Amino acid sequence: MTPPDAFVSAFFALPEGRFAGTSGDRRYVVVRQQLAKGKSHKLVAHELGGTDYISMNLYQTRISGALLRPCEMAASKVIAFVLDFEPDA
């Protein structure tokens, strides 16, 4: 699916690597990786002290632009997570 522009902006505002932060009232450890010379991006988040899990890939294509591929979950869950996520300072 082609994600909303606000999602793409929020995704690329997140730091690369491993970091912690908050989405909603939950704390997460997140890993964001850039792959294939920037054409592919992966994000995995684990809730601290809980069972929530977020996993997704974002592909940058010349023809279609950004393509979101959630891993075994609804795209709406991934989009809501990224839009709401606040990394720790």
Image: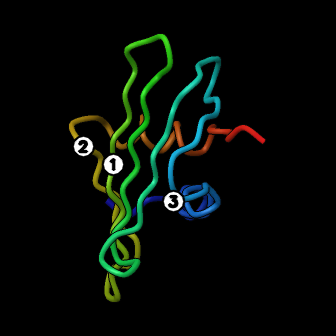
Q: What is the CA distance from the residue labelled 3 to the residue labelled 1?
A: 15 Å
- Residue 27 location, x and y as percent? 59, 23
Q: What is the CA distance from the residue labelled 3 to the residue labelled 2?
A: 18 Å
**Amino acid type, label 2:** Cys
Q: Circle 1 sits in a helix, a strand or a loop, which is it?
A: strand
Question: Quick one: label 1, few (<14), some, or many (20+) residues within 10 Å?
Answer: some
Total number of numbered labels?
3
Checking the image for residue 56, the label placed there is 1
Q: Are marks 2 and 1 in contact (CB under 8 Å)?
A: yes
Where 26 sits versus 59, above or below?
Answer: above
**Amino acid type, label 1:** Met
List the residue tagged with mark 2.
71
- Give the mark, 2 or 1, whose residue is nearer the N terminus: 1
Q: Circle 2 sits in a helix, a strand or a loop, which is it?
A: loop
Choose between 58 and 80: the one closer to the eye: 58
- Residue 13 location, x and y as percent? 64, 60
List the residue tagged with mark 3.
4
